Image (cartoon, rainbow, N blue to C red):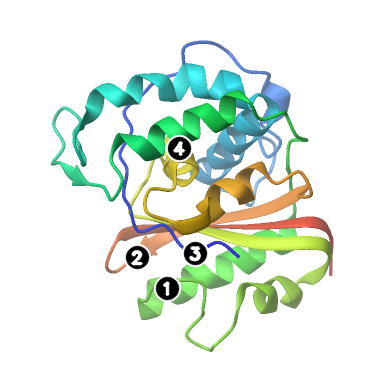
Amino acid sequence: MAIFNYFLIIIMLTSQSNWDNELNTARNLDYMSETEKAILFEINKVRSNPARYAKEYMETLGTYYDGNKLIYPGQPPIITTEGKRALNECIFLLKKTNPVTPLNPERGLYLAALDHVKDQRENGGIGHFGSDGSKPIDRIERYGTWDISAAENISYGIEDARQIVMSLLIDDGVPGRGHRENILNSTFTVTGISCDSHPGYGITCVMDFAGAYKSK
């Protein structure tokens, strides 16, 4: 199980080319916000072509580092734990990672993620445990039955979908790179993503994953 992401990596990049819109698997859903849909689109981009994602969106990030400071125009410096090393490691790994199946949205997993962002909006707190003591698996099982595998990623303080996904891929300071592993995990086929405000960090985005899932 990945731990949540403390590091608010702000990445000001634009797409250099078009991606297959079929990767935008939540595009026609009415229960997800545009940000939530965009996060899933970004996750599916990197899953479908990790090397391309690294080349188009991540290779230029090195110019924004000054030692352990990540500095973007108009933004205050972000103090990272590992500096450019974590970025370079991520790029190297993505370039040798095989594509995996894109994820489809699943309403029960969305509701599980929604429960957690609502809880943290109302009660504060960070991490994977709810104020009622619930774990990710508890919330996932409220709304359906999962199989094969399940996990959860959480991002704090980042509003842009690509920034969220790239921050989790870099996973600065996170032992084991659990967020990255979840995004690239070949056993996962479905996900639920929900974002809401957070009293301390501004915004929380929760991503629940499963190898298979049957919503109630």
Quadrant position of the C terminus in the picture: bottom right
Alpha carbons under labels 1 and 2: distance apart: 6 Å
- Give the left or right position of residue 115, taking residue 190 as reference: left
Q: Does the CB distance between marks 4 and 2 fall below 8 Å?
A: no
**Mark number, residue 57:** none
Q: Which mark is residue 198?
A: 2
Q: CA distance from mark 3 to mark 4?
A: 16 Å
Q: Which residue is mark 4?
A: 166
Asked if residue 112 can be seen in this view, the reply is yes
Tell me if residue 3 comes above or below residue 165 in the rendering.
Answer: below
Q: Amino acid at mark 2?
A: His
Q: Is residue 7 above or below residue 116?
A: above
Residue at the image position 39 percent from the left and 34 percent from the top: 87
Three-letter code for the amino acid on which mark 1 is drawn: Gln
Q: Earlier in the sequence, mark 3 or mark 4?
A: 3
**Residue farthest to the top, as pictured:** 17
Query: Is 41 left, or right, of 143 in this rendering?
Result: left
Residue density around tag 3, few if under 14, some if 14–19, many if 20 or more, within 10 Å: some
Q: Secondary structure at mark 4?
A: helix
Q: Position of residue 77 (x, y in %)?
A: 15, 41
Which mark is first along the chain, 3 or 2?
A: 3
Instruction: Tell whether label 2 touches label 1 (CB within 8 Å).
Output: yes
Disc 1 target residue = 120
What amino acid is found at the position of numbered circle 3 in the picture? Answer: Ile
Nearest to the observer: residue 3 or residue 67: 67
**Location of residue 52 by image quarter:** top right
